[in-house]
Amino acid sequence: MIGAAAYLRAALSQNCVSSVVLTIAIPLGRNDLTHAKFIGIAADCTWHIQICMDEIDWNLVRAFHATADAGSLSAAARKLGLTQPTLSRQVAALEAKLGVTLFERVGKKLIATDVALGLLAHAQNMATAADAMALAAAGSVQDVEGRVTISATDTIAAYVLPDIVARLRREAPQVTVAIVASNSFSDLRRREADIAIRHVRPTEPELIGRLVRETTAHFYASARWIAENGLPASFESISAADLVAFEPVEQFAEHLARIGITVRPDEFRMVSENAVVLWEIVRSGLGVCMMLREIAERTPGIVRLLPDLPGVPVPIWLVSHRELRTSRRVRLVFQILAEELSGEGCVPC
């Protein structure tokens, strides 16, 4: 059978193929091609990519993948924790090594070229493999020290987590707690977070979740707003202009419709995708907002409106990757979060 080196040279010497397969093989005492791992790199038939796999630096591939995913060097640099010039040099180095142009600049954005799009799926496969290795390594750590990243919505992060972090500082002083405050899901499979606090059950088979609490959301206003507008007897007596809405407003209007409240999206006058901003608007006496009961009860000067109106059920899930549950520090932080969020800990509700 053809040898590994000869197979590689033969594959790369073809100028008109729909894909080029770069083969990494480790001979086991024979000249034939033994069991190997394959990394497929798609290329347009007009491209002839000559490359030695021994010289490929994963950091360069990672820089390309992050830039293509983020759409800009600045966003990709923030995601990888690099400076923009460093990331730019890594992308340029990969382009030079491959002998192709991977990105074209259009205004402030980088647009992936056709050849880059062909390579992207394979860079994703490499990233997935690297993430899996990192997860396995992180899961094997038994020290109760190091970094644990917690992802939560902006309101949970701002108003609930500080009390829980205080307990973590007392009981696990060597653990560094990093908080990602975002209303979008962090990708736990790519280690964007170790533990996520979510309001939906995880569906990915690699993730495990624990339902720690069933809570409710209600309408609230400040005592100042009530002094100026009076205590509403029904929802209809609240002006739509006083309703503070979450972006996207169309989705928020649909949520209200499910509980029998009809408001057109164009009727809202105060909107934001940042719930902390909206809550501060309510605290300032400018409007009425729907908020989790636990957060409202932690906020001085806030009054629940329409107590006869049923609350909107909101589940609270703790989610982590299966690989990380073998890490002592992740298990410890997960357990403390579960106790505090369920009401078993010392956080007042």
Image (cartoon, grey):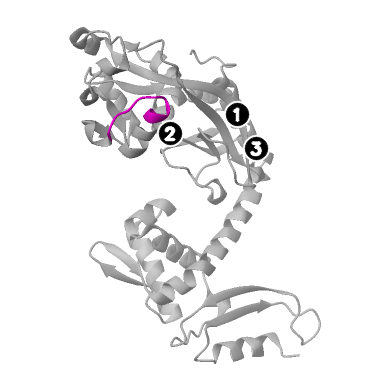
Instruction: Kindly identify which numbered label has been placed on residue 85.
Output: none
Image spot of residue 262 (x, y percent): 32, 28
Residue receiving disc 2: 153
Q: Quadrant of residue 11?
A: bottom right
Residue 261 within the magenta-colored segment of the rendering? yes
Residue receiving disc 1: 211
Seen as rendered, the residue at the extreme left is 228
**Dot placed on the residue nearer the N-terminal end, 1 or 3:** 3
Asked whether residue 170 appears in the rendered view, the answer is: no
Q: Nearer the viewer, mark 3 or mark 2?
A: 2
Image spot of residue 255 (x, y percent): 40, 31
Residue receiving disc 3: 143
Image spot of residue 47 (x, y percent): 44, 86
Residues tagged 1 and 2 counted as in contact (Cβ below 8 A): no
Magenta range: 256-264
Going by the image, does 16 lie left or right of 268? right
Image spot of residue 314 (x, y percent): 49, 26
